[in-house]
Image (spheres, rainbow, N blue to C red):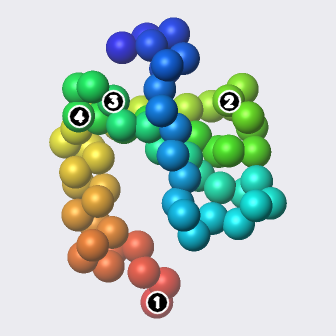
Amino acid sequence: MNDADLTGAHWRKSTRSNNQGNCVEVAFLGDGGAAVRDSKDQGSGSVLRYTASEWTAFLGGVKNGEFDRP
């Protein structure tokens, strides 16, 4: 998938996000992967792309507490 393929992506942010524009948005891709961006860049900033297996590993780490603060 190239960058042009993201023009039609459906970007979502958490319902717990505030209205100050300091949010992370995610778009789920057709191949099972995901793209992540900073909402304050209004679509002009960098986008991080994850394969389906990378995204699954990330979500597993979140659920298992790997990213909890000590």
- Name the residue: 45% across, 13% down: 5
Label 2: state its secondary structure.
Answer: loop
Of the pair 51 and 26, the residue shown nearer to us? 26
Residue 32 is marked as 4
Q: Quadrant of residue 50?
A: top left
Of the pair 30 and 38, the residue shown nearer to us? 30
- Tag 3 and tag 2, C-beta contact below 8 Å: no
Q: Position of residue 2 (x, y in %)?
A: 43, 11
Q: How many labels sit on residues?
A: 4
Mark whose residue sits in front, 3 or 1: 3
- Tag 3 and tag 4, C-beta contact below 8 Å: yes
Residue 29 is marked as 3
Quarter of the picture holding the N terminus: top left
Label 3: state its secondary structure.
Answer: loop
Residue 43 is marked as 2
- Name the amino acid type tagged 4: Gly
Q: Which of the two discs, 3 and 2, labels the residue nearer the N terminus?
A: 3
The reply, left or right, for residue 42 in relation to residue 51 is right
The span from disc 1 to disc 4 (Cα, nearest Å) is: 32 Å
Please tell me how crowded label 2 is: few (under 14), some (14-19), or many (20+) other residues with Cα within 10 Å: some
- Name the amino acid type tagged 1: Pro
Q: Which of the two discs, 1 and 2, labels the residue nearer the N terminus?
A: 2
- Tag 3 and tag 1, C-beta contact below 8 Å: no
The span from disc 1 to disc 2 (Cα, nearest Å) is: 33 Å
Residue 61 appears in the rendering: yes
Residue 48 appears in the rendering: no
Label 1: state its secondary structure.
Answer: loop
Label 4: state its secondary structure.
Answer: loop
The span from disc 3 to disc 4 (Cα, nearest Å) is: 6 Å
- Name the amino acid type tagged 3: Leu
Reading the image, the residue beneath label 1 is 70
- Name the residue: 33% across, 69% down: 62
